[in-house]
Image (cartoon, rainbow, N blue to C red):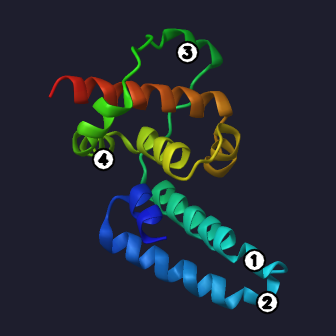
Amino acid sequence: MYHTCLRVVLHAADAEDILQDAFMEAFMNLGKLKNTEAFGGWLKRIVLNKSINHVKRNRQSWLEMEEADLADIPGEQSTSELEFAEKLEAVMEALNGLPEKYRIVINLYVFEQMNFEKIATLMELTSSTVRVQYMRGRQKILNRVRNK
């Protein structure tokens, strides 16, 4: 849970505080959980919501994108898994250097395996905006890794 939170907020102290708040909220609302087998997913959802809310409170502004902006994104060549594995450190460094709007979307899509619609709902954006942010963030990561 800590790494989930840290990937969103990028600051260890903030992640620790958010995680503590999430556990407190979960403990206080444990009686509302009907299916105890879903505890892990329920707790992860609380952690993600608190992490994203923290980022939202501290952000400058989110850029809303039009559906037409999808056409402006250049295509990219596929990267082999071996090449990706060899450059994992560079990829993580590039990911952490992205603007938060791209970084959060990529973290939720890649690491948390959320679909674009769930991410859009969670971040209060349109799904086309989330797709654009994912594609642009992915392209920025690939460009940075290729240039190293």
Q: Earlier in the sequence, mark 4 or mark 1?
A: 1
The label number, if any, that marks residue 85 in the structure image: none
- Circle 4 packing at 10 Å, graded few (<14), some (14-19), many (20+), is some
Q: Are marks 2 and 4 in contact (CB under 8 Å)?
A: no
The residue that disc 3 covers is 69
- Residue drawn at x 28%, y 42% is 88
Residue 7's place in the image compared with 80, above or below, is below
Q: Nearer the viewer, mark 4 or mark 3?
A: 4
Q: Secondary structure at mark 3?
A: helix
Instruction: Give the residue type that dot 4 points to.
Output: Asn
The label number, if any, that marks residue 96 in the structure image: 4
- Residue drawn at x 63%, y 73% is 43
Instruction: Give the residue type that dot 1 points to.
Output: Glu
Q: CA distance from mark 1 to mark 2?
A: 14 Å
The label number, if any, that marks residue 31 in the structure image: 2
Residue 113's place in the image compared with 44, above or below, is above
Name of the residue lying farthest toward the left: 148
- Residue drawn at x 61%, y 12% is 68
Q: CA distance from mark 2 to mark 4?
A: 37 Å
Q: Earlier in the sequence, mark 2 or mark 4?
A: 2
The residue that disc 1 covers is 37
Residue 17's place in the image compared with 141, above or below, is below
Which is nearer the eye, 81 or 135?
81
Which is nearer the eye, 96 or 57?
96
